[in-house]
Amino acid sequence: MRHAVFSLLLLLVIAPASRAQSDRLTLERYLEWEDVNDPQISPDGRRIVFTRRWVDKQKDRWQSALWIMNADGSQQRFLVEGSSPRWSPDGTRIAFIAEDENGRPQIFVKWVDLPEPPTQLTHLTEAPGSITWSPDGRMIAFTMNVPVEVRWNVDLPKPPEGATWTKPPRLVRRLHYRADRRGFMEEAYTHLFVIPAEGGTPRQLTEGTWHVGPRFDGLPAGATLSWTPDGRTIVFDGFKASADSVDRNYRNAHLYAIDVATRQLRQLTREPGRWTQPAVSPDGRWVAFTGYAETRQTYHAADLWLMPLDGSTAPRNLTRTLDRDVSNLHWAPDGSGVYFTIDDRGTRNVYFASVRGEVRQVTRGVHMLTLSSIARNGIAVGVRTSYHEPDDVVRFMLDRPDQIERLTAVNDDVLQDVKLGEVEEIWYASRDGTRIQGWIVKPPDFEPSQKYPLILHIHGGPHAMYNVGFNYSFQNFAANGYVVLYTNPRGSTGYGTEFGAAISQAYPGVDHEDLMAGVDAVLARGYIDPDRLFVTGCSGGGVLSSWAIGQTDRFAAAAVRCPVTDWISMAGTTDVPLFTFNWFDRPFWEDPSDWLARSPLMLAGRVKTPTLLMTGELDLRTPMSQTEEYYVALKMRGVPVVLLRFHEEYHGTGSRPSNFMRTQAYIMDWFEKKGRIPGVTVEAEE
């Protein structure tokens, strides 16, 4: 899908280098960008349905639809508007979620070989999720919020006739009452339902003041549902406890099995921890799942576990020696074991664990490869990306995993005449000798004899992982003449529990040292101008970029995006309060010293770096007040500082296509002028 390019807003300031050469990855090209995700192969391995997204230039948002193609990639075509496609067990139908005529998400079913439009199965008032077919294709299980009516009635005088009084106040009685990108949430609990695949009345299987589906600090998320082969039982993840315990649950989850006919519920896992992603074996004997036991560590790698469905023996850890996060579980068609993916040192590949506990790597490559579904004949499909290749749907045979075939090419037309920057992997020693991995993106036509400006780009999370996938932002910076350094300091995932948990209750900390050592390592190569060092990052990257300029004045300018600057005020204003409290050994009312010592705001007196602050006005994760506190502190000190409040943005500044482009353009203009924007900033007094 390609649409005519519209002119950029006059307010969009583009650095001169982006206009200089037509073979560069410019911001204009972003308007033609597309991506693909969630490919699902039919049970017989003949066809693949997937979600395709593109930029709607008129509405300034991403749009998506379902496309279908043959398993060899031929006959790619639009199928229907919607998302979350799932094949029926016989491969004749696809269930998916789409909006009805009133704009409410509903479950639809499309008969693939019939020309008739899809059938709307549900008429729900709440959005469905986690749709999963029963093995016989007669029912579809799904999750949905069940609202709880909460009222506090008081007696007031009757309004005069024709008067317009304000609405009653919003009643809040839970710790978790809002979520980023959703806003305020009505009090509700997520429960499990089933509906006949031909349509009918949904039947609620679970009930009570608890959630089906695991939650991280109360944030809404999808559940994993897995039917037993006989269609009598559904295994799922969630957390069943008292309402108060559910509200105060940070990240624990359990596995449950429910009898579809009688609604009898039993808990499968017993040890407290985060146990998720259940997958029932083809013979119904085993349940594979991921997780780890309860811990105070802010990060722990999730292992692959196996237990009998009847609970007769304790779960077995199949991947203890991997020490990497396991995800995307799929049973082998013959039931011999489980295929899954792990993130490892910036890459993602497919692995296999037999029921006996033998683990082997299946695919290899410097790429990010998801595993979305497997057909009965052993064809697997997923999405792959690498340094210079954006996301595309791929397929491979499980018995020939070295032959990965790309089926889509949704951005080849955008990149066909573009010269991309080289990406180089580096490893370097931090100040205490710890080995750190990173990558350097170099400008096209890079000449090592020249001097280039450097952007240190810090990832968020902080428990996340930069990877080898295509990155439009970094390539756009490189196209404008910047060298980009992105690294995985301690605290990052993909390197094991000890590495990821190195910042537990000590953040920021050694991660800052790892980042600065990376800058030193690139400076030592001789092609970086030491007077043009810049730093940026959002969320956790905002924390560390604001922390960095409080520790050093080596950067000529900084772009601090969506940061946490004051941990005490963060705890009371964010949508993840338990996440915040978990970073400290004691609450601030008992001892605020560590809370203050880890807050970049407390270092404002040391900052000399011209600083651009960028945060979404709707941000509930690192609320605007975090940025405002920092802005005022720097302003009071006379530091050159500008605050950009992004409209219609929650956490981050790039969900809207125009805001992504603005983010890039403002950062480059700020860095190009080293924070000295005539008429915008005021020079600090010497």
Image (cartoon, rainbow, N blue to C red):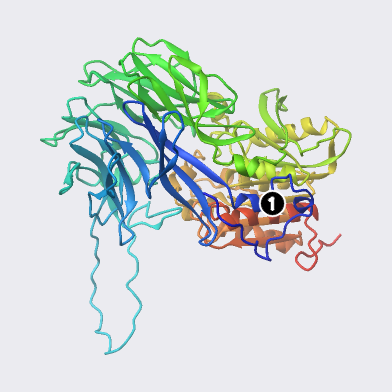
64, 4: nearer the viewer: 4
Amino acid carrying mark 1 in the image? Ala
Asked if one can make out residue 650 in the rendered structure from this viewpoint, the answer is yes
Q: Residue at x 25, y 26 (%)?
A: 268
Question: Can you say whether 84 is above or below 384 in the image?
Answer: below
Measured as percent of width and height from the top left, residue 393 is found at 49, 33
Q: Residue pushed farthest left?
A: 262
Question: Can you say whether 663 is above or below 346 in the image?
Answer: below
Question: Can you say whether 652 is above or below 443 in the image?
Answer: below
Measured as percent of width and height from the top left, residue 363 is found at 51, 19
Q: Secondary structure at mark 1?
A: strand
Q: Residue at x 42, y 24 (%)?
A: 380
Q: Residue at x 53, y 62 (%)?
A: 58
509, 259: nearer the viewer: 259
Measured as percent of width and height from the top left, residue 633 is found at 68, 59
Q: Residue pushed farthest bottom?
A: 161
Q: Quarter of the image for the C terminus: give it.
A: bottom right
In the visual, does 440 lie left or right of 237? right
Asked if one can make out residue 222 in the rendered structure from this viewpoint, the answer is no
Question: Can you say whether 16 is above or below 191 in the image?
Answer: below
Measured as percent of width and height from the top left, residue 364 is found at 55, 19
> For mark 1, what is the residue?
559
Tell me the quarter of the picture where residue 527 sits: top right
In the visual, does 255 lie left or right of 498? left
Tell me the quarter of the picture where residue 329 sits: top left
